[in-house]
Image (cartoon, rainbow, N blue to C red):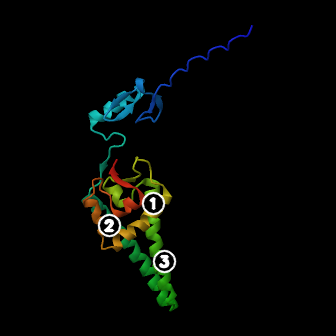
Amino acid sequence: AVLAPAAAPEAIPARPTGWCALCQGKFPTEEMLEFRGQLVCAACKPAYFQRIREGAPLPGEFRYGGFWARFSAKFIDGFLLGFMNILVSGFFAVLAGAAGEPIIGLLAYLVVFGIGIAYSTVLVGAYGATLGKLALGLRVVRPDGSPVGYGRAFCRHFAEILSSLIFCVGYLMAAFDVQKRSLHDRICDTRVIYP
């Protein structure tokens, strides 16, 4: 007698899963709460609603730095860098007078340019903000709120130069953008927010 093959057991349908907006853990969606289009796991519900009660921004929701706040931060940074540039230029001017070498002027320009690059790259890469932005409580972040990092901060510095080269129209874009993005924010995919 030939035995019939055993019937394959019915496959259990996979339970749909989702990612928690706070802890980023993966859970079955039936065990999660959906609120304002976001899923929250059981463990994160109290913290999530505490943020709502306090008026703190939720994940994916930011309070963007407006045009005038960004302008003020840029003014502070410009003042600090201008003072540093005067000191460096003065030092090189004394050096040029003593040595009588015109190449020292070029060297002074390169040092001043390097200070500007280092200023924005190191501060935005490490702290998410220049001193001007820190003074006004602003931070530069990625669209998901993650840190910018040194590479993107370096590129953002040069994108900012582009924003100023076109009669500062790149900066003015922040006044008319919903997310208050300037041209350099669009190029580097960054946002300036209040944390």
Q: Secondary structure at mark 3?
A: helix
- The image quarter containing residue 85 is bottom left
Can you say whether 83 is above or below 190 in the image? below
Question: Closer to the camera: disc 1 or disc 3?
Answer: 1
Percent from the top left, x then y, of residue 127?
43, 54
Identify the residue shown where x is 30% and y is 53%: 179
Residue type, mark 3 in image = Leu
Identify the residue shown where x is 34% and y is 58%: 133
Percent from the top left, x then y, of residue 141?
40, 52
Residue 74 is left or right of residue 99, and the answer is left
Q: Earlier in the sequence, mark 2 or mark 3?
A: 3
The answer for how far apart the CA atoms under marks 1 and 3 are is 20 Å
- The tag on residue 170 is 2
Identify the residue shown where x is 73% and y is 10%: 2
Residue 8 is left or right of residue 129, and the answer is right
Percent from the top left, x then y, of residue 61?
32, 43
Across the whole image, how many numbered discs are drawn on residues? Answer: 3
Question: Closer to the camera: disc 2 or disc 3?
Answer: 2
Q: Toward the viewer: 146 or 54?
A: 146
The residue to which callout 3 is attached is 110
| Quarter the N terminus occupies | top right
The answer for how far apart the CA atoms under marks 2 and 1 are is 17 Å
